[in-house]
Image (tube, rainbow, N blue to C red):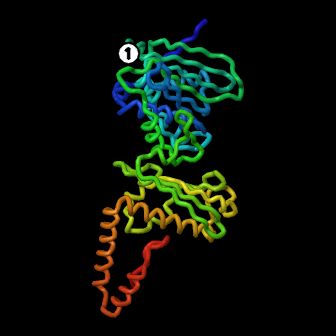
Amino acid sequence: MPLHANFRVDPRLASLLGESYRSTEHALRELVDNAWDADADNVRITLPQPMTDEPIVVADDGSGMTEAEVRKHYLMIANDRYSRRGTQTPRHARPVRGRKGIGKFAGLVAAEDMRVETWAGGRKTTLNISKTVLLQAKGDLEKVDLPLVVEDCDAEKQGTAITLSKLNSRFTIPAPEALREILALEYGRCSGFTIRVNEEPLSHEDIQGQVFTKTVELPNAGTVTLRFTVMTGAKGARHAGIVTRVGGKVVGKPAMFGLEQQEEIPRKLLNRIVGEIEADGLEGDVTADWGALFENSAPYQAVQQWAQENLKESVGSVFAQEVSLAKARRQKKIDEVLAKLPEHRRQYATKRASKNTPSRGGDAGLA
């Protein structure tokens, strides 16, 4: 006997369903947010080739859902996830992104039919949702019967796959390049969360801007390669900075290697730097929990200094006018301070200021 399921509707539904997405690429990002919240390590997005009737598939290896969870949580629309499960995910303690409970509708922006397949606890649950059927309900979604199939599966298998078929002919097929850039801005700096679009993993090179690659041999650190993008778009990155990769593994959080302490590089420009630095020679300088590199490691300090100089030079070349103005503002502040000093101290302070080069610790005092 076939099973059915029904939406459970929160009173806020009417207002929340009025929200829209700027593009199908932004709508698909909502499905990736759901995978993030499900503690997935990997997400694979398959986009159709032009002039085909292939579906869009978004699959993850997250926690998946049991039949009970599908009925109780997935089909609860517009219910604040924070109030149900807290602000962090259970396995990776990630900050929860999906908050309004309507991200599931994002797939229906791009397609007529959405099939949800989810694996958990040795059971596979399949749910089919039709946009036409939902629209015919005229808001009375609790009375819509959704076809539901539950069957046994491999006890080790878990995750969720969303298949979007009968794509909306009014919209162009989601562009891989546009989708990759949107996702790279949001998730490109997130360790332990790999996203592949048509089997190609994201990288900072998916972000619009000027790409730089620099390599050097440093004593006791070996070969060090710095790859980064200086973004030229209207906004900066949410997870700006350079991640350090040792032996293929990310260590710690994105950093600016002291540039954030230099007044001549405006903060808004630092938010446009996204990239990574590979330094396999630092493996002996990583903390036991792999959460950071020892700050007093001489090889690591040399890597930081080299990276800082290259980042500063590159940002200055891309945003020459902004950096020039920042330098002028800094010099004006120095001149104002010097003007207030007695003559004998002014001469000494002027010499110090002329020799002073901003370092990791910031500008030295003038007196």
Q: Where 66 falls versus 363 (above or below)?
A: above
Q: How many marks?
A: 1
Image quadrant for the C terminus? bottom left
Q: Quadrant of residue 105?
A: top left
- Left or right relative to 311: residue 266: left
Q: Quadrant of residue 247?
A: bottom right
> Is residue 123 or residue 56 the one in the foreground?
56
Residue ID at (58%, 44%) = 93
Residue type, label 1: Leu
Q: Residue 143 in the image: state x and y as whole percent.
A: 44, 12
- Residue farthest to the bottom, as pictured: 344
- Residue farthest to the right, as pictured: 155
Q: Residue 234 in the image: state x and y as whole percent.
A: 34, 48
Q: Residue 366 in the image: state x and y as whole percent.
A: 39, 82
- Left or right relative to 61: residue 327: left
Which secondary structure, mark 1? Answer: helix
Image quadrant for the N terminus? top right
Q: Residue 75 in the image: state x and y as whole percent.
A: 50, 23
Q: Where 87 falls versus 294 (above or below)?
A: above
Location of mark 1 (residue): 135
- Left or right relative to 250: residue 111: left
Residue ID at (48%, 17%) = 129
> Is residue 69 or residue 316 the one in the foreground?
316
The 10 Å Cα crowd at callout 1, few under 14, some 14 to 19, many 20 or more, is few
